[in-house]
Amino acid sequence: MRPPHLLLTLFLAGITAAAPSAAAAQSTANCPDCPTWNAPTAPFHLFGNTYYVGTRGLSALLVTSPEGHVLIDAGLPESAPLIAGSIRALGFRVEDVRVILNSHVHFDHAGGIAELQRMSGAEVVASAASAPVLERGTVGRDDPQFGAVASIARVARVRVIPAGDTVQVGSLQLRALRTAGHTPGGTSWTWTTCEGETCWAIVYGDSQSAISADGFLFSRSTTYPRVLEDFEAGFTALEQVRCDVLVTPHPDATGLWARLARREGGEREAMRDPGACKRYAATARERLAQRVASERERKP
């Protein structure tokens, strides 16, 4: 691993080299949090063959192999050059990204996919519910946030993967977990990576928050009638999966920066927390129950 000062220099150089195209510069109107989410941060080694290449508020992970790499999530449209710069600062080539995966299709996690696909030539792999959204660039009426989220640049060459199936690039194997509810196609990803004889299961756990546009009711939706069942199935999947390290699309949701600070302070296994996925699911289940209870108190 390069010294931090050199890594930051290379990172900033990579941003300059990866000038955004028109697609990457797409406006993200009505998003007061976007400038904070998209603040640059130096990439870092997570564990084994896995690296954080996202921004301060929007996660993206690079899983590497000699045969090619997998990128998970791509932030905002404006995040694409930052992610490309992070990949290069770590000493990897954007052109060696073979597959791009996604957690869910909102503009703050899928907005940079089309640009990073253009830069890398990668195939995009997504769930059956997410693929058509990526291809047309807009969410459907079944999305709880329909009407409240920005569109994204259309994505080409999207391959559908069923839940439970595995994406393989050379020696890499990443398994898809269906964790819908936040969106109908929400997907978490899990893989195992090793350092010597120590192997950890990493989970990129999709957002599990019951957030919606005005007028959407999780307790009695006609556009997404299975939303509560989907949420519960996702909670169960996260509770049952082996989970040594959990990273979420918004890194602050699971204390990533605090864990990184502890590791930099000398706590070597600060990133590891085998109970993180269970707590993440339990917290989301409790908040969903609170949301449903508040809806049932309203007059029809």
Image: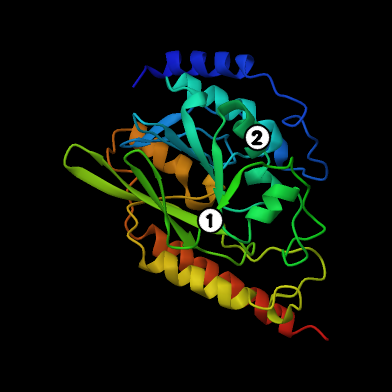
Left or right: residue 8 compared with residue 105: left
Q: Nearer the viewer, residue 266 or 251?
A: 251
Q: Nearer the viewer, residue 12 or 103?
A: 103
Q: CA distance from mark 1 to mark 2?
A: 18 Å
Quarter holding the N terminus is top left
Q: Position of residue 31 (x, y in %)?
A: 77, 44
Q: Position of residue 30 (x, y in %)?
A: 82, 45
The residue under the point 70% across, 35% down is 77
The residue under the point 60% across, 47% down is 158
Three-letter amino acid code at the position of disc 1: Asp
Q: Nearer the viewer, residue 12 or 64?
A: 64
Left or right: residue 300 compared with residue 165: right
Q: Residue furthest left?
A: 197
Quarter holding the C terminus is bottom right
Question: In this figure, which residue is indicated by the disc labeled 2?
Answer: 38
Label 1: state its secondary structure. loop
Q: Are marks 1 and 2 in contact (CB under 8 Å)?
A: no
Which of the 4 image quarters holds residue 56?
Answer: top right
Q: Give the class, few, some or many, for how many residues have Cα within 10 Å of label 1's Cα (few <14, many ≥20).
A: many
Question: In this figure, which residue is indicated by the disc labeled 1?
Answer: 206
Numbered badge on residue 135:
none
The residue under the point 78% across, 47% down is 151
